[in-house]
Amino acid sequence: MTTDGSNRWDARLYDDRHAFVWRSAASLVELLAPQRGERILDVGCGTGHLTAQLAAAGAEAVGIDASATMIEEARRNHPGAQFFVADARDYRADEPFDAVFSNAALHWVRPPEAAVRTIHSALRPGGRFVAEFGGCGNVARVVAALRRLQGEFFPTAAIPDWYFPSVAEYASLLEAAGLETREAWLFDRPTPLEGNDGLRSWARMFATDAVAAVDTNRAEEFFSRLEAELRSELFRDGGWFADYRRLRITAVRIK
Ligand code: BEZ
C-alpha cells in the first residue's frame, strides 16, 4: 500500500486491523472489469488481496509495492499472482500492460508526476487506468488534530505529506502525460475504524513516524488528547470514523 517507502509498514497490523482498505474496493475492481488473459499492473498492491482478485478473474496480474514486508506477505498469501518490490516513481515494465490499477496508494507518492509517468509507460496505447486514492480534503480533520498536537508531542517528526488532489488537478497531470480522463468522482466515504482504539490504530499504522516520536511515557496522554480533539467530529454510534474523501478516476492512454 505504499509506493515509495515513505512510511514504515506493519503488514500484519495492516491485514488484521485495516482490511477495510481492500474490502471497500470491490466496486473499483468492478469498474476495472478485469478480463481473462489481460496483463494488469496493480500499483501499491500492499498485501496483494486485490491483485489476487484480478488474477482470479483470469488476468495475468502483477503487483508492485515499495514495502518489502508487504510484498513478502502478498507472496505468502497469494501464489497465483506475481509480486515485486518496486517504487512507483521509477518502475519500468519489460512488457506493456493492458490496464493499470491502483487502490489507496497514490496519495503516498511524491512527486505525483513521477507515478503518472510510470503509469503511462506501463500501459500499451489504448490501455486503461483505473484508480482510487485520497482526494482533496481527505482526512482533513485527523491531519488538523495531529498538527495541533505536533508541537507538544512530536516536534521533530513529520506528519506524512500525503498527496490529495482535486479532480481538475489530477486530470491535468494525466493529460500532460498522455492519458485522457474518461470519468472522475470525488466523494466522501466516512470509513469505520474497527474497535474502541480504532483511531489510535489508524494513527499507528499510517502516521508511523509521528506516533513513534512520541515519548513512550506520554503515549497514553497523546492518544487520549488525539481522541478528545476528534471525538465530537469522528466518533458516532459507538465507533470511530475516518473522514475519508476518495478520488476515483478512469483514464486511457491516448499518446
Ligand atoms: C487513505 O486511504 O485515504 C489514507 C490512508 C492512510 C493515510 C492517509 C490516507
Image (cartoon, helix red, strand yellow):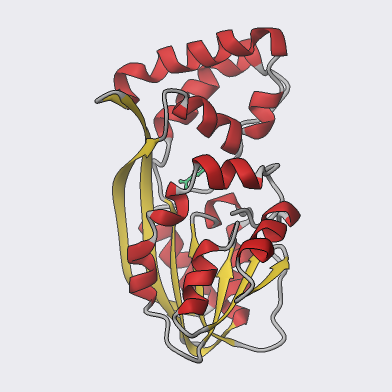
Q: Is the residue 44 above or below the residue 39 in the image? A: above
Q: Is the residue 112 above or below the residue 36 in the image? A: above
- Residue 18 in view (yes/no): yes
In percent of width and height, residue 4 lies at 69, 55
- Residue 162 in view (yes/no): no
Q: Residue at x 61, y 37 (%)?
A: 160
Q: Residue at x 63, y 45 (%)?
A: 12
Q: Residue at x 59, y 50 (%)?
A: 108
Residue 51 figure quarter: bottom right
The one of 55 and 146 positioned closer to us in this rendering: 55
The one of 29 and 164 positioned closer to us in this rendering: 29
Q: Which quadrant does the N terminus fall into?
A: bottom right
Q: Is the residue 82 above or below the residue 253 in the image? A: above
Q: Is the residue 33 above or below the residue 145 in the image? A: below
Count the labels in the image. Answer: 0
In percent of width and height, residue 171 lies at 42, 66
In percent of width and height, residue 19 lies at 47, 48
In percent of width and height, residue 45 lies at 58, 62
Tell me if 219 is positioned left or right of 203 in this view. Answer: right
The one of 138 and 8 positioned closer to us in this rendering: 8
Tell me if 189 is positioned left or right of 10 in this view. Answer: left
